[in-house]
Image: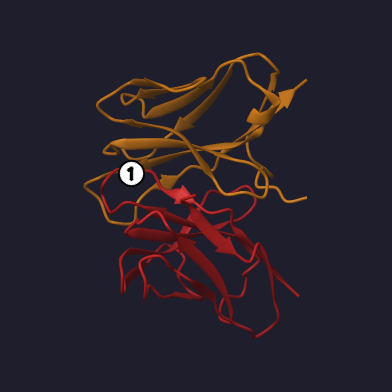
Amino acid sequence: GESVGLHLPTLSVQEGDNSIINCAYSNSASDYFIWYKQESGKGPQFIIDIRSNMDKRQGQRVTVLLNKTVKHLSLQIAATQPGDSAVYFCAENYSGGGADGLTFGKGTHLIIQP
Amino acid sequence: DGGITQSPKYLFRKEGQNVTLSCEQNLNHDAMYWYRQDPGQGLRLIYYSQIVNDFQKGDIAEGYSVSREKKESFPLTVTSAQKNPTAFYLCASSKGQNSNQPQHFGDGTRLSIL
């Protein structure tokens, strides 16, 4: 079937456990970050965003942590469910840069074990 | 419901043929983008448009063309000059340039070669 997860880093977790997905971003001047979820054969879906003046932001069952010192972003998913199986990728933007918008990471394939 | 609609979902191209992928949004967004996604890779920017009747090349524009005659529509033509067109094509929109806003995606068009 269709898959955008081929050859990506894979994270396998048990249903009900917490998941932590990591992302190293490239531009130290980036001031806006987003996490997307992409299911097979579908477009990316916005999960949560964070601006560089924050180091933590919480949503429903998700938390994003930003460490600007080491240019690291993480997405924590609480009580992982089968529907969380997807490819997750981060995106960054520098508002003082060009108008071409976000720079996307390659993604991590999250697999939920029953 | 507001959103981005891409059509068709699947498209097949013959040798020497140009094909056009449709992207329509009713979110009243100024900016629109076209990305190409290959297995195991991140999204690569083909073209983007910040305003009607204006568009800019992205990182991999060769073999592609676009138009932006209406705010709601940003069609992408894959020309015969694109020698490796097989990929998943994603259209996105956002409120505007450098506004640190998330991009919202359609569900993609999968293009294959006959």
Residue B50 place in picture, x, y as percent? 30, 62
Closer-to-camera residue (A63/B63): A63
Chain that is coloured orange in the picture:
A
Q: Secondary structure at mark 1?
A: loop
**Colouring scheme applied when the structure was drawn:** by chain
Chain that is coloured red in the picture:
B
Residue at 53% x, 59% y: name it. Answer: B5
Q: How many marks?
A: 1
Chain letter for mark 1: B
Q: Residue placed farthest to the front in the image?
A: B1
**Quarter holding the C terminus of chain A?**
top right
The residue that mark 1 highlights is: B101
Closer-to-camera residue (B52/B111): B52
Q: Is residue B83 above or below residue A114?
A: below
Q: Residue placed farthest to the bottom in the image?
A: B16
Residue A84 place in picture, x, y as percent? 63, 29
Residue B14 place in picture, x, y as percent? 71, 81
Q: Check disc 1 and give the amino acid type.
A: Gln
Q: Is residue A96 above or below residue A21?
A: below
Residue at 66% x, 22% y: name it. Answer: A81
Q: Is residue B14 above or below residue A28?
A: below
